[in-house]
Amino acid sequence: MNSLLSSTDLFIFFGSLIAVMGMGLWVGRKEDSSEDYFLAGRSTRWWGVAGSIFGSNVSANHIVGMMGVGFAVGFAQSHFEITAIAGLLMLCYFFLPVYRKLNVYTLSDYLSRRYDDRSRVSYALIMVIIMVVIQMVPGFYIGSRSINILLQGDTGRKAVAEA
């Protein structure tokens, strides 16, 4: 059984993986505190924060899903991404100054200060459940299907078992 991936493909894939991990470790060694690591020492401009939020929002699930819906529906589905620009700009212009003034790092930290720790814990639990059920399970399924296709394996029950 021949694989769709050649040794050159595997070399490029693993080489890129090692290079990105190495660069992250090398750049991260200069960070002294969690504030430096997570907030870039609070020196990032609004457009850098918007780019970071957008970059962390777009995942493989997002790209595959948007391509599938775009193929099925057409360009009309692009409103999802176009309106995201307005949402990110509002986030950066209106909420970022509030977060910086209150010296909070995350939404759960803000909820804890605004209400109490129960709201922070409730929000964290809800988000963990959402991440696992809505994002991770389909992501593992799509990933396992893709790997099975690339390696020309069984794409039936094996893909479900891997997910």
Image (tube, rainbow, N blue to C red):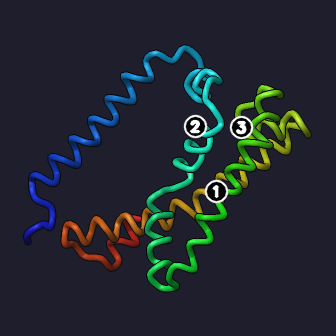
Q: Nearer the viewer, mark 3 or mark 1?
A: 1
Along the line of sight, which residue is nearer the eye, 53 or 130?
A: 53
Q: What is the spatial separation of the Cα atoms under label 2 and label 1, in whole angstroms?
A: 14 Å
View extreme (bottom): residue: 72
Look at 56% across and 42% down and name the residue there: 52
Residue 20's spot in the image, x, y percent? Answer: 33, 36
Q: Secondary structure at mark 2?
A: helix
Is the N terminus in the top left, top right, bottom left or bottom right quadrant?
bottom left
Residue type pointed to by label 1: Ile
Q: Residues within 10 Å of mark 2 (few under 14, many from 20)?
A: few
Q: Are marks 3 and 2 in contact (CB under 8 Å)?
A: no
On the image, numbered disc 1 is attached to which residue?
85
Look at 45% across and 23% down and name the residue there: 28
Look at 72% across and 55% down and name the residue there: 126
The answer to which of marks 2 and 1 sits earlier in the sequence is 2
Residue 162's spot in the image, x, y percent? Answer: 37, 64
On the image, numbered disc 2 is attached to which residue?
48
Along the line of sight, which residue is nearer the eye, 124 or 36?
A: 36
